[in-house]
Image (cartoon, rainbow, N blue to C red):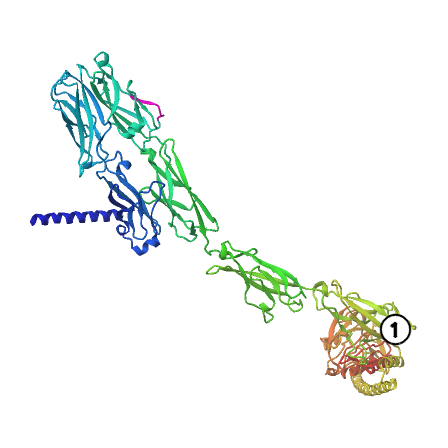
Amino acid sequence: MCAAGRRRGRRERALLWCVLVAAWEAAWGQLRYSVPEEMPKGSFVGDVAKDLELELPALRQRDLSILDKGRTQYFALHGKTGHLVTAQRIDREQLCRLLEKCVLRCEVIVEGEMQVYGIEVEITDINDNAPSFQESETQLRISETTAPGSRFPLARAHDPDVGRNSLQSYELSGDEHFSLAVQAGPGGDQRPELVLAKALDREEAAFHELVLRASDGGEPARTGTARIRVAVLDANDNAPVFSQAEYTVRVPEDVPVGSVLVTVRATDADEGLNGHVKYSLKKVSHMALEIFQLDVETGAITLVRSLDFEEGDSYEVEVQAEDGGGLSGMAKVAIVVTDVNDNAPELTVSSALSAISEDAPSGTVVALLHVQDRDSGANGEVRCSMAERLPFRLEKSFEDYYRVVTARELDREEVAEYNVTVRAADGGSPALWSSAVLALRVLDVNDNAPVFAEARYSARLPENNAAGALVLTVRAADADWGQNARVRYRLSEGRVRGSPLSSYVSVQAETGALYALRSFDYEEVREVWLWVRAEDGGAPALSSNVSVRLVIVDENDNAPQVLYPPAAAAPGAGWAGVELAPRSAEPGALVAKVVAVDADAGQNAWLSYELAKATEPGLFRVGLHSGEVRTARFLLARDAARQSLVVVVKDNGRPALSATATLTVVLAESVAELLAELGSAAAAPDEPAGSLTRWLVVAVAAVSCLFLAFLLLLLALRLRRWRWRRSQLPAAGSGAFRGIPASHFVGIDGVRAFLHSYSHEVSLTADSRKSQLRLSGGSCCDTLPAQPPPDEPVPLLAEDPASARRADPAAPPVSSSDETFSATLPSAASLPVPPCSVSRLGRFSCEEGKTLVSNALCAGASCSGQANMGLCLSVTAGVGGRRSGATVALNFLSARLCRD
């Protein structure tokens, strides 16, 4: 029991040791199995999935398979069970002729992990071959004089099996004259020898028949036999002797066929037939018989088939030299084949990716390569390399396996596809090499935002464009590929004049075309700023913006608009523009001014004026750019009292647009003439002319009465002041007024008073409550205050200019040079003493009700100050945009009173 327990313990320890060794080998990527030869196809070899600790459900995902290197596949792998089985019947003697240990190797790859595991399967021998002799029958010639104890080499049997299944023993049977002796050779092999146990007698027996049996150690044992026929000869006492007991020759594997590798020589001291030596091969393998040939006469060993170091690196044969008397000698010939670099490295792609994402991290495995060289030594040392400029590198994986991994991150926009060439070169001289090309496509990742072709866009769009007109096209390019490079456009939010930007313009999402959704008006919108966003189709999407400036270009779509003279509101509502011109006007005198504006801009708003039609051609002219209507010559008596002028106002657009203004200029020297002209012009078709005249006379009479009352009041105030200052006037003969022309003095009650003359140019605009007054200093000499303060008396007599200046600091300086200044005329109701407006040609635009009083006061002042100057007052007053003939007549009457 104790002995049985110890044996069981030893078995358990041995089993545990085997399990540990298998686990250690599996951890280092190497599995070892053994299987007997001659097993049928599909026989179980080992459980690879279990030894590699792979779960069965994950086998399909990991794709476990045996690498195909283009050789004969002796094993197969079941994908579902992970079992390694035989793919065909394996003959150990055929695969491993000269090897003591027969091991077949294969590699298993796990595609999902890019991992390779090596598998070694030892093919164990079975006793499937019986010992055999090269010749089934051998004839020996032995002289009858041969002494007992002589030994004669016999042909050895050959058994391809190994171990106990190989040749183990020899047995000889058949005759008492001979016995068998087995000698151990240098390599441990058995060499049978025939020993002469008893002297021969040819006369007793000329031939002896023997049987040599060779047995192996299998169970059951297998045997092979050879028949030996011994012929008894007459005496031959010298056997052939080789010059060397062992011949060794080294030949390269590329030696040409037909070359003599070595020549063996043996000599025999006998003469005649007993001295003639012939050579034969003994103990030679079947492969050696196919490669070498021995010349029986010369002993030359010739190459009959090319050598291959990878098939066999050495061969041993035994050569027997036999003379004519039957004596022989043996010599051993060893032929060593040296390797020549005749095999290029074999580079195969075990597994490879066809595509890789550009954001794959550095170190990602791209391909798994296997390299081998059938040469040996330096000729079989293989070095793999690849181009340095590529973003890949080689790493040693397992034995002769290499991995191609990424050396850095890839960029598809730089290189979209790689053709990676891996080169394998051996260490021979010259070196042989082979290469493999890996085609790798880089998959795109959305890592580039769209980029516009321009940093900013600008376009000019003429106004009054058609709705839906193409403005411009923005273009953005994306360096990515596929959906990531598909760019779509849209407008950023914004407002134009309080309205959403999308109501003005739109962008086509696919093409980037910008369209106007409405017709633009330059007078409303002159430019539009907007942002266009380009967005790609990646996930997440990337985008970029660009500014677009849309400039609205003005077109000549607005005709000039005449502000003055205003157009008549309705037929019979009065005159569109009536101007009064005295017949005494000189050439160049200002009669009227046409005022017009144009809503366009630039040259489309440049206006020019042209007299298109006149009652008397050549009587008036119009300023080209000012629109001023002036007399072109002196007025003649034959000229019609009522002149109708049509002024055309044109802009500078293409084509030019225009407007017309109609002016009526009345030439009048007397009230009757004026009233007649105005009455005939102002009378409506359904209103009698007498009714209008009657109303005009009533208006003139009322205003005249008011004017006379004001003159009387003014005269009383003047007389009071004159008396107060009379005592302060110098004597008539004093020199206070020396150098002053006499025309500047008038006499009032024997008193000489200094008068101040004025010259005014009045410019008035239609419907305006303020007018521009232009004073020309050229007609003023020794200027007195134009209007004294309300709390000071207005002097009628002459004063010292210096004292007058001290009394009124605001008065304009005394000057004899031309001086022009402008002042705004206040309404007449706000002045205690209205300013005097006297000119040869002038016009007022006053409010209704104040106009009559202002003109009446002005006329009264002119009468009191300049009754003898002979001036003519021309006034045109506007009442609510309409012209009143009564007002014109009253002004004319006031002017006549001043003249008279």
Question: Which residue is the extreme one toward the top?
Answer: 271
Residue 658 is situated, as x and y percent measured from the top left of the image, at 77, 67
Tell me which amino acid carries mark 1. Ser
Quadrant of the image for the C terminus?
Answer: bottom right
Residue 169 is situated, as x and y percent measured from the top left of the image, at 16, 31
Residue 373 is situated, as x and y percent measured from the top left of the image, at 34, 37
Taken as a whole, is the magenta stretch helix, strand or loop? Answer: loop
- Against 817, residue 426 (above or below) is above
Q: Is residue 397 a member of the stretch shown in magenta? A: no
Q: Is residue 258 a member of the stretch shown in magenta? A: yes
Residue 817 in view (yes/no)? no
Q: Nearer the viewer, residue 579 or 568?
A: 568
At a point 72% along the width and 63% down the height, the residue shown is 603
Question: Which residue is the extreme one toward the left?
Answer: 1
Q: Is residue 419 left or right of residue 69?
A: right
Numbered circles on residues, count? 1
What span is in magenta? 255-262
Query: Residue 187, located in which quarter of the rendered image?
Result: top left
Question: Which residue is the extreme one toward the front?
Answer: 204
Q: Nearer the viewer, residue 695 or 264?
A: 264
- Against 788, residue 299 (above or below) is above
At a point 79% along the width and 65% down the height, the residue shown is 624
Q: Is residue 5 left or right of residue 315?
A: left
Q: Secondary structure at mark 1?
A: loop
For label 1, the residue is: 584
Q: Nearer the viewer, residue 608 or 474?
A: 474
- Against 686, residue 66 (above or below) is above
Query: Residue 155, located in which quarter of the rendered image?
Result: top left
Residue 785 is situated, as x and y percent measured from the top left of the image, at 76, 76
Q: Residues within 10 Å of mark 1 (few under 14, many from 20)?
A: some
Residue 888 in view (yes/no)? yes
Q: Nearer the viewer, residue 761 or 460?
A: 460
